[in-house]
Image (cartoon, grey):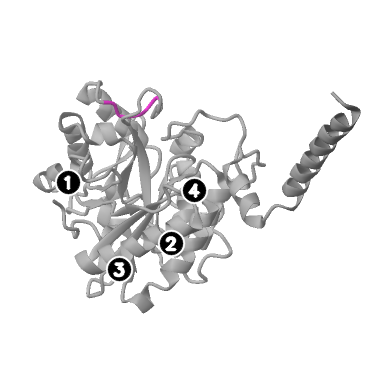
Amino acid sequence: MPLYALFAVAGILVAALIGIFLWLEFSSDAVTDEMRAVRPQVNVRMLSPARSGHDDSAAKETEHDSAASAPKSSSKDRVPQIPDSASASPTVLHPHPDPQLVEKTDIGLLPVIGKDGRQPWRVYSRPFNALEKRPRVAIVMIGLGVSFNATESAVAELPGEVTLAFSEKLNEWIDAARGAGHEVLINVPMEPRGYPRNDPGPFGLMTGLRPDENKRRLDWILSRMTGYVGVTNLLGDRFAGNKVAVQPVLRELARRGLMFVDTVEPNISTVPSIAPGIKLPLAVSSKVVDQVASRANIEQELSVVERIAKTQGNAVVIARPYPVTVRLLKRWAAGLGEKGLALAPISAVANRQELK
């Protein structure tokens, strides 16, 4: 090869390396935010504030328990605080655990319907004006607790009407989320169609297990914290689509006075056909808005949600705690009133949707 060609190749390589370095050094804040949100968290443990109404022994047992599929990490996250950026006077939710709405078991506290007929999904809900006539839009952010930074941002930045669903660090986040006025759900991992490539984890509910084993796994997940209004499925399209497998689980949730938020597409899930017959409070996803986590796609999907709400009277948004999603949802939610829509907690949409 001629000498000048070698110099040319060397020049191209040097230019490429310089370009990569400059891009990494001066990339936009948005790119940096996205990378920080998904990086593994190595944080410092700080002293925990006193837990309101928690049983200390149960809290110690469950401090590092997880209801999600991700493996446990040896790192210890900071203990969440009620964020300073939250509303100065957030809506106060009913204290938890209400002693009349729990039963003590070997694995921890489990929710029950009170002897007076009170149900946890109503007692722990965020107050909402029942006389509201505008179409209702509920936002549920799933998969929280995995990343400290992403979860902290969702708790602090999103309006209190937004419902937060946790997969990890359940006990550690409950007071911060509810203290900021958010209703809380537990993400229950369920078998997806891509299993075993997509594994829901050691406590995932599976179509191949006996009903009593799935119930045991469900109860373990439910015992990780108190004060939640219900559960939502994490993954789970195969499990939700299997009527024989999912029905005992739904019956158990109804028996314990909880609601269910179905994130699986209605044409796949059998939950909407089961819930009315067992009197299970139900809300179903109208749209997962950040399957493609880009600004253009999310804004387009939110426009679809607006049309659904105005046409059907109710709509449920499912989203994940990506920085771009949190930013767009915060701005979008603030403008719903001008569009004739009302932002509502998920409990205010239960049993109000048109289900086919």
Pick the front one: 168 or 141: 141
> Height in image: 60 above or below 331?
above
Q: Report how far apart the C-alphas of labels 4 and 1 lie in the structure.
A: 30 Å
Mark in front: 3 vs 2 = 2
Label the magenta part by its dominant secondary structure: loop
Name the residue type under label 4: Trp
> Could you tell me which secondary element the residue under label 4 belongs to?
helix
What label sits on residue 299 in the rendered view? 2
User: Which quadrant, please, contains the N terminus?
Assistant: top right
Image position, residue 30 (x, y; %):
61, 55
Q: Which residues make up the magenta segment? A: 202-206
> Could you tell me which secondary element the residue under label 3 belongs to?
loop
Question: Mark 4 sits on what residue?
Answer: 173
Dots 4, 3 in contact, CB < 8 A? no
Name the residue type under label 3: Phe
Residue at image x 28%, y 26%?
Answer: 206
Q: Residues within 10 Å of mark 1 (few under 14, many from 20)?
A: some
Residue at image x 49%, y 44%?
Answer: 145
Question: Mark 3 sits on what residue?
Answer: 128
Q: Report how far apart the C-alphas of labels 3 and 2 lie in the structure.
A: 26 Å
Q: How crowded is mark 4: few (under 14 residues within 10 Å), some or many (20 or more)?
A: many
Nearer-N-terminus badge (4/1) = 4
Image position, residue 252 (x, y; %):
21, 37
In this picture, residue 174 sits left or right of residue 246: right
Q: Report how far apart the C-alphas of labels 4 and 3 lie in the structure.
A: 23 Å
Nearer-N-terminus badge (4/3) = 3
> Residue 253's image quarter?
top left
Total count of labels: 4
